[in-house]
Image (tube, rainbow, N blue to C red):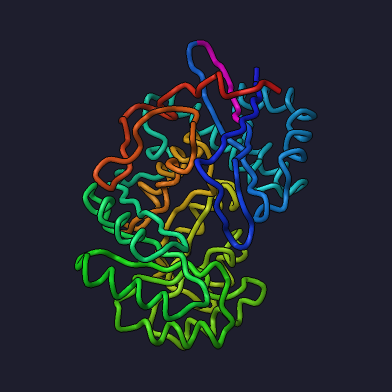
């Protein structure tokens, strides 16, 4: 039988993303048992980014629970996910059900999830760390700690204070010669600001700038990318395969930032990666602040679909004051895979409420 559990995980401290303050994360853990095998999935729409709400997803799951249980049993779940995706258009629902199905198959076959997704051998997954809109000294201290632990890439949150940003980047370059620096503007710049700032930052060897302008008009993003020497990454502008195709056809960006929980079906993610390769666009996977269940699945995707030698945004477990497992995820700046089939742990039942 398919079981549903709700979680509420508080963050260590509130933080802001795109003008929204987050204090906790809520989501659903799916559990499906088959003999001694227990498989898991996670559904966690992100308020302010996902169009669907957690309540809407729970309603659909409760109505369709019996059908879903049968489809996992007889193997028709892929068709059911496609139909539900067409009817509801809830990416988090599609991804969570797909995650559960891949976890179940991997445990049935005794192989890693990555081996179900691609014939390529799973590779090492480097991770970046993030520095928010903090004082320079705090950022330098954090960078020193992270570099000491093997991290090689920092994602620096940016705002409209150009002088402050240049001051921090200059200090990072002076103190940490080999570190890669990427920026995340979270849509905060106008086209004119983006072009001016990124031209001035060209000399600092910026890996890329994530979503410098608002996602509403892809032509503006294309215009910025065409005007500046710093590579541009699409994040908020990339929410589905249609977005990916439009960006690829226009050759608007050099990087795709894929958040699977906001993207949807794993098949669509695979096809997007293939299209990105055809257009010489690099793919970076990152979380939408899911629990460790979702992060594990995203890491498996990154190990075979993410571009090699690029850090991925998987170091978000540290934002929680408690999580569904104490499994050590990051070792020496890379995601640690235990080598076991599927989701390799049992979520902490004390943090789950059955629906």
Q: Nearer the viewer, residue 89 or 194?
A: 194
Q: Position of residue 70 (x, y in %)?
A: 68, 22
Q: Residue at x 65, y 29 (%)?
A: 6
Q: Nearer the viewer, residue 197 or 329?
A: 197
Classify the position of the C terminus by image quarter: top right
Q: Can you say whether 228 is above or below 113 in the image?
A: below
- As drawn, 185 above or below 96: below
Q: Is residue 30 left or right of residue 125?
A: right
* Above or below, comparing residue 273 to residue 346 in the picture: below
Main SS, magenta residues: strand
Measured from the top left, where is residue 298 in percent x and y? 46, 44
Find out whether residue 316 is within the magenta segment.
no
| Numbered range of the magenta stretch | 29-35
Compared to residue 18, the image places residue 194 above or below, namely below
What is the total number of numbered labels drawn onto the structure image?
0
| Residue ID at (45%, 60%) | 132
The residue shown at (31%, 38%) is 336
Can the viewer see residue 8? yes
- Report x, y in % for residue 21: 62, 53
Q: Is residue 34 magenta?
A: yes
Q: Where does the N terminus fall, quadrant-wise?
A: top right
Q: Position of residue 305 (x, y in %)?
A: 40, 52
């Amino acid at each position: 039988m398919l079981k549903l559990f709700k979680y509420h995980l508080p963050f260590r401290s509130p933080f802001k993303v795109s003008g929204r303050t987050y204090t906790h994360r809520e989501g659903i853990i799916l559990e499906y048992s088959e003999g001694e095998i227990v498989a898991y999935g996670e559904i966690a729409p992100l308020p302010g980014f996902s169009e669907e709400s957690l309540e809407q997803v729970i309603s659909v799951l409760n109505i369709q629970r019996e059908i879903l249980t049968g489809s996992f049993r007889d193997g028709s779940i892929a068709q059911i996910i496609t139909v539900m995706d067409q009817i509801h258009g809830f990416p988090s629902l599609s991804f969570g059900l797909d995650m559960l199905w891949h976890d179940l198959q991997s445990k049935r076959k005794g192989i890693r999830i990555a081996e179900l997704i691609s014939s390529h051998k799973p590779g090492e997954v480097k991770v970046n760390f993030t520095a928010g809109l903090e004082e320079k000294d705090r950022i330098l201290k954090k960078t020193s700690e992270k570099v000491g632990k093997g991290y090689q890439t920092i994602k620096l949150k940016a705002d409209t204070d150009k002088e402050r940003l240049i001051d921090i980047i200059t200090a990072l370059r002076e103190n940490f010669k080999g570190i890669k620096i990427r920026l995340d503007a979270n849509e905060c710049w106008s086209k004119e600001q983006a072009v001016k700032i990124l031209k001035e930052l060209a000399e600092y060897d910026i890996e890329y700038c994530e979503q410098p302008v608002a996602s509403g008009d892809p032509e503006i993003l294309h215009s910025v990318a065409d005007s500046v020497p710093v590579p541009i990454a699409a994040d908020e502008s990339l929410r589905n395969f249609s977005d990916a195709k439009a960006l690829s056809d226009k050759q608007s960006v050099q990087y795709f930032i894929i958040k699977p929980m906001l993207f949807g079906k794993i098949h669509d993610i695979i096809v997007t990666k293939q299209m990105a390769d055809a257009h010489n666009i690099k793919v970076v996977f990152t979380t939408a602040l899911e629990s460790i269940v979702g992060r594990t699945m995203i890491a498996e995707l990154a190990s075979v679909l993410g571009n090699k030698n690029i850090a991925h945004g998987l170091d978000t477990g540290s934002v929680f004051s408690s999580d569904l497992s104490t499994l050590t995820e990051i070792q020496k700046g890379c995601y640690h895979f235990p080598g076991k089939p599927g989701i390799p742990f049992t979520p902490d039942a004390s943090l789950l409420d059955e629906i």
